[in-house]
Amino acid sequence: MHGLQLITSFFNRHLHAAEVAVPRSETLLLSERSDRNRSKGKRLAMLSVAVLLVLLLPLPLASASEHNHRYQLDEPVTLWVNKVGPYNNPQETYNYYILPFCKTSENPATNGVGLERDVEKGSICTIELDAMKAMDFTDAIESSYWFEFFIDDLPLWGFVGETDRNNENKHFLFTHKNIFIRYNGNQIIHVNLTQESPKLLEVGKTLDMTYSVKWLPTNVTFARRFDVYLDYPFFEHQIHWFSIFNSFMMVIFLTGLVSMILMRTLRNDYAKYAREEDDLETLERDVSEESGWKLVHGDVFRPARNLVLLSSLVGIGTQLATLVLLVILLAIVGMLYIGRGTIITTFIVCYALTSFISGYVSGGLYSRSGGKTWIKAMILAASLFPFMCFGIGLFLNTIAIFYRSLAAIPFGTMVVMFILWAFISFPLALLGTVVGRNWSGTPNNPCRVKTIPRPIPEKKWYLTPSIVSLMGGLLPFGSIFIEMYFVFTSFWNYKVYYVYGFMLLVFLILIIVTVCVTIVGTYFLLNAENYYWQWTSFFSAASTALYVYLYSIYYYYVKTKMSGFFQTSFYFGYTLMFCLGLGILCGAVGYLGSALFVRRIYRNIKCD
């Protein structure tokens, strides 16, 4: 493979799928300038640099300094060219050289730039505008194209050009780039890029592309160098705190409601069933006059319809809940937002390692409910969610390949992900199913299941399973509504999400609210003498994801300026993938909470 393709392939494997491919490199030489007038506390004198643009020469994938972020004298500092694309469409990214920027093949040693001084104005190359180049640049400027570079894992951004405010038919290309690099000792702390010298795009015109580099000392430590990218006023706004407080009050209300049901309503019912045998006639008369949850004790533990699917979803949802909690804790401890694609990589690896949980929970539930088709249950628990994501990802990847976008997941990355699933995730899920079947698969229902199912009486429309399911997701969605705005803004509007402490609180609140709401819905359903509570409890909690998806539609049209088939497909495709995971997670939590509730209320009554 050509050296350039090797570089691209390497970075494709290590960056986020939507922000991949570092197809070219440019070299910065770091040197020392002696200055005896500096204070003794300075370890290095004024640094200077020569930016040598070598776009076609084969270079190492990354110097050792890019791993430890410490540079020696005269050691190359690599400037990586990452991507270009419309600013309003974050996922629509292309190779930087899809635009007719010039490329140079000069040797660094012949560029003639002094190594002990800042670069005032260096020449990159010359662009001779023909009709095609002018049109490409014009289209890019009209679409607000921006580009992204990296120096020492720190991003630099800039727009390709600008449109004349007084004449929309005149477009200007920025021809000069100013690079500012702040350093502390032998470590780069901050980089910034500004542009100037806009030149009118005219066919036949010659444009001189130039650059300058300025090194500036700073007292900011290396540990704090990413703080400049964090939007503290946005994420720590008082409305963020208010939403947490509001959700916390909702938790108190719902837990109080559930406690009231358990301690007042059910306590009176238990008293009737706890009478001694000498009062049997009164008990039989009371029972014959009563209706509600007590009358379905012989059917409430009847196996759910389509048991194999339900058990698989509950197992997968339990794994996802554990996974989300684990990743949030790792993000809090390890600041995973710093590295490009680190969150995604951590999520994928942790998913594979936690697959035992899905198998264990689904296997135990399937066995306790009397399931027989074990092979189907094991395979479904191990592959259902990954293949759902794979189907969506394949569709989006096909679109990206058709558009020749860098958002396309490289084949090598897909192979690595398949290996993780086939050799780690899948075996762990199978092992978990076997262990769950043998360790927690013994039926221990408080009441026996009657042979003949009890007929379900007709009830009012608001007590039907479909309405209970739809209503069940409103309060959980309300508890995460504000946080969804911050999460969506981070993912779709170029902000770095770093307040994982907030996310942890919101996630715990979501779990508690989901359990409480589902328990209340299950209680009303059983009181309506409908004993098919399993799927209703699952969908009642999972409907939270439906409201999140509806909110995403509102966010797309009101809060963003996205356009085009490509970005629309990626927006709703990624959101669908997220909502599927959220729905399965909430559904599993709701089902498990309802299952504990049902076992608790039927444990103290006298069953036939």
Image (cartoon, rainbow, N blue to C red):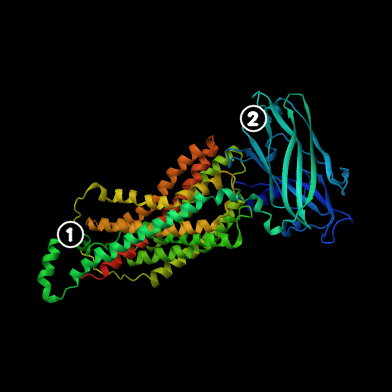
Secondary structure of residue under mark 2: helix
x and y, in percent, of residue 58 in the image: 77, 48
Q: CA distance from mark 2 to mark 1?
A: 71 Å
For this view, does 25 lie left or right of residue 442? right
Q: Which labelled disc corresponds to residue 135? A: none
Please state which of the two labelled residues, at mark 2 or mark 1, is closer to the viewer: 1
The amino acid on which the numbered mark 2 sits, given as a three-letter code, is Asp
Instruction: Rate crowding at label 2 as few (under 14), some (14 to 19) or many (20 or more) other CA atoms within 10 Å.
Output: some
> In the rendered view of the protein, which quadrant contains the C terminus?
bottom left
Secondary structure of residue under mark 1: loop
In which quadrant of the rendered view does residue 81 lie? top right
According to the picture, the residue beneath numbered tag 2 turns out to be 139
- The reply to whether callout 2 and callout 1 are in contact (CB within 8 Å) is no
Answer yes or no: is residue 422 visible: no
In which quadrant of the rendered view does residue 306 lie? bottom left
Mark 2 or mark 1: name the one nearer the start of the chain: 2
Count every numbered label the image shows and give the total.
2
Q: Is residue 433 above or below residue 212?
A: below
For this view, does 48 lie left or right of residue 267? right
Q: Residue at x 71, y 49 (%)?
A: 7
Question: 446 or 376, which is in the foreground?
Answer: 446
Q: Is residue 519 above or below residue 98?
A: below
x and y, in percent, of residue 439 in the image: 39, 72
According to the picture, the residue beneath numbered tag 1 turns out to be 291
Question: 383 or 98, which is in the foreground?
Answer: 98
For this view, does 85 lie left or right of residue 109? left
Question: 150 or 378, which is in the foreground?
Answer: 150
x and y, in percent, of residue 434 in the image: 42, 68
Q: Residue at x 63, y 34 (%)?
A: 144
Instruction: Rate crowding at label 1 as few (under 14), some (14 to 19) or many (20 or more) other CA atoms within 10 Å.
Output: few
Q: Is residue 558 above or below residue 78?
A: above
The amino acid on which the numbered mark 1 sits, given as a three-letter code, is Ser
